[in-house]
């Protein structure tokens, strides 16, 4: 696990990364350069990711996190239809195995998205309940209030915020058994980790059974729970290595946009300094659920570079949302899910090279992954801190006035 601490995670929204096989394109298909709508498909797939592994290796990525790839009707795939099938628009099981094998050759881990809080309304168990009512053996997989089942205008069943994602009953032994089977299946195929969607909506007992099933197959498998609040107490209760740290994102944007001062910033992220249990958390600056980083920093390349410097030097695992490394713009969902721009003439190359250097530095210097942290100085326009082990020290100075982040390295 210590080696994983040096990794940089790269999040991919498969439909928008690269179209490697036009023969599996869903229809109708939008042109790659068009802006997305909520229902638009662009044709990105698993073969496309495999073909771009050279790019990810060049960048220095150590793990890729794929948003859901299982069969589902939507573009985002959080409305699962079958957890044991690759969505046909993304490719085949053999193409996934090829991606996994090729990624592992490049020493890149593969982390899948486990959407177990809810299913899609086309999931076979929900469909059976819809057709057969209380006679269905799956009626008690959900909280269904009456029959016949109605999706619109107001669903008569518990859902996860949208009518087409009915929420499961996680105390049902059959539901637990199904997801144990799902986790075992993909873990046996050889994946390296799970990111669990809406994990806080389900009690720890469910997750203990799920994670134990995976650990029995691969003792080194990684578990990350989606979470939007301060993660210290969450990680004490849940059997995960880390969580998605959106508190870091919010505070970093506020700092760089001068909405809070350095002292307040450090107070907000104090848990990252004091609690080593949070060091497997993903330092988020963007995701498929947030507006793009560069736009949030009003187009400032210098502030973006400062944000990435903090992401790579504050305790936690840095996560790059696909395209942020080239300065891809995007507003609120679905605009934050624009297709990757492979035309290098459009790239913010200064950001790209800065991230490459940060990834390289983090691999070379253990102080940035496992080293202790000490705040050295706090001023109105900046602060400095040190990451250190018994053999090396790295000092980071954040200057908000000059919009610069300075890194100083030394051997002890």
Image (spheres, rainbow, N blue to C red):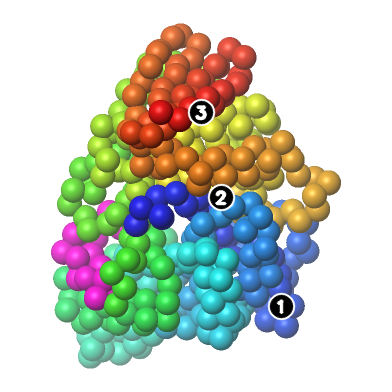
Q: Quadrant of the C terminus?
A: top left
* SS at circle 2: strand
| Residue found 80% across the figure and 49% down from its top | 344
The reply to whether discs 1 and 2 touch (Cβ–Cβ < 8 Å) is: no
Residue carrying label 3: 409
Nearer-N-terminus badge (3/1): 1
Q: Are marks 3 and 2 in contact (CB under 8 Å)?
A: no
Magenta-colored stretch includes residue 343: no
Residue 128 spot, x, y in % from top left: 34, 87
Residue 324: percent from the left, percent from the top? 62, 45
Q: Which residues are magenta?
A: 199-216
Q: Which residue is mark 1?
A: 21
Tag shown at residue 321: 2
Mark 1 surroundings within 10 Å by alpha-carbon count, few (fewer than 14), some (14 through 19), many (20 or more): some
- Residue 380 sits above or below residue 115 on the image: above
* Residue 59 against residue 67 in the figure, above or below: above
């Amino acid at each position: 696990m210590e080696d994983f601490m040096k990794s940089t995670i790269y999040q991919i929204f498969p439909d928008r990364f690269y179209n490697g096989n036009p023969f599996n394109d869903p229809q109708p298909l939008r042109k790659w350069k068009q802006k997305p709508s909520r229902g638009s498909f662009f044709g990105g797939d698993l073969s496309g990711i495999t073909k771009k592994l050279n790019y990810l290796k060049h960048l220095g990525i150590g793990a890729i996190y794929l948003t859901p790839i299982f069969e589902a009707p939507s573009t985002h795939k959080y409305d699962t239809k079958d957890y044991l099938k690759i969505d046909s628009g993304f490719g085949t099981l053999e193409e996934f195995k090829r991606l996994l094998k090729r990624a592992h050759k490049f020493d890149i881990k593969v982390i899948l998205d486990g959407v177990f809080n809810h299913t899609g309304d086309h999931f076979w168990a929900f469909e059976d309940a819809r057709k057969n009512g209380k006679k269905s053996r799956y009626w008690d997989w959900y909280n269904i209030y009456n029959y016949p089942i109605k999706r619109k205008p107001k669903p008569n069943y518990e859902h996860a915020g949208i009518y087409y994602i009915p929420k499961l009953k996680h105390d049902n032994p059959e539901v637990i058994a199904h997801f144990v089977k799902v986790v075992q299946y993909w873990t046996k195929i050889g994946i390296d980790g799970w990111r669990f969607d809406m994990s806080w909506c389900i009690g720890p007992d469910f997750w203990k059974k799920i994670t134990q099933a995976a650990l029995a197959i691969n003792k080194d498998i990684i578990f990350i729970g989606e979470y939007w609040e301060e993660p210290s107490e969450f990680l004490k209760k849940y059997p995960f290595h880390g969580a998605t740290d959106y508190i870091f994102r919010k505070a970093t944007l506020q700092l760089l946009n001068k909405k809070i001062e350095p002292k307040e910033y450090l107070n907000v992220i104090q848990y990252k300094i004091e609690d080593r249990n949070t060091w497997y958390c993903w330092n988020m600056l963007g995701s498929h659920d947030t507006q793009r980083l560069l736009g949030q920093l009003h187009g400032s390349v210098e502030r973006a570079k400062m944000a990435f410097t903090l992401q790579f030097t504050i305790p936690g695992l840095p996560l790059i949302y696909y395209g942020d490394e080239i300065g891809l713009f995007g507003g609120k969902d679905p605009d934050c899910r624009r297709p990757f721009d492979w035309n290098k003439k459009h790239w913010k190359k200064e950001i790209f090279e800065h991230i490459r250097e940060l990834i390289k530095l983090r691999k070379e210097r253990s102080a940035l992954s496992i080293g202790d942290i000490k705040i050295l100085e706090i001023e109105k326009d900046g602060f400095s801190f040190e990451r250190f082990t018994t053999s090396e020290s790295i000092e980071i100075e954040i200057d908000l006035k000059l919009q610069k982040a300075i890194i100083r390295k030394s051997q002890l």
